[in-house]
Amino acid sequence: MDNNNLISYEDIYSEIKETLLLSRNQAYSAVNFAMVQAYWQIGRIIVEHE
């Protein structure tokens, strides 16, 4: 295997890794946002029924 193929595979690996990390962070963000909305709604329901 020549050096150009090795560099190409490393670039591909880095791009895949970055894509997965970005997607994971977006998923965490979406879940956190959904949980904040849920807690906000729960608080609103409690206050309305007091």
Image: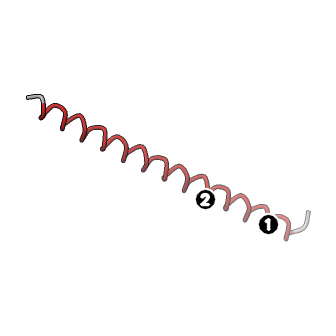
Residue 33 location, x and y as percent?
36, 47
Label located before the other in sequence (1 or 2):
1
Q: Residues within 10 Å of mark 1 (few under 14, many from 20)?
A: few
What residue is at 45 percent from the left and 47 percent from the top?
28
The one nearer the camera, 31 or 1, is 31
Q: Is residue 23 above or below residue 49?
A: below
Q: Residues within 10 Å of mark 2 (few under 14, many from 20)?
A: few
Residue type, label 1 = Ser
On screen, residue 2 versus residue 27, left or right, reads: right
Residue 13 location, x and y as percent?
71, 58
The one nearer the camera, 12 or 35, is 35
All told, the count of numbered labels is 2
What residue is at 12 percent from the left and 34 percent from the top?
48
Residue type, label 2 = Glu
The one nearer the camera, 36 or 10, is 36
Q: Is residue 46 above or below residue 3?
A: above
On screen, residue 47 versus residue 40, left or right, reads: left
Q: Secondary structure at mark 2?
A: helix
The one nearer the camera, 24 or 34, is 34
- Residue beneath disc 1: 8
Q: Residue 38, located in which quarter of the rendered image?
A: top left
Query: For the view shown, which residue lies furthest in the front direction?
Result: 48
- Residue beneath disc 2: 18
Query: For the view shown, which residue lies furthest in the bottom direction?
Result: 4
**Mark in front: 1 vs 2:** 2
Looking at the figure, which quarter contains the N terminus? bottom right
On screen, residue 26 versus residue 50, left or right, reads: right
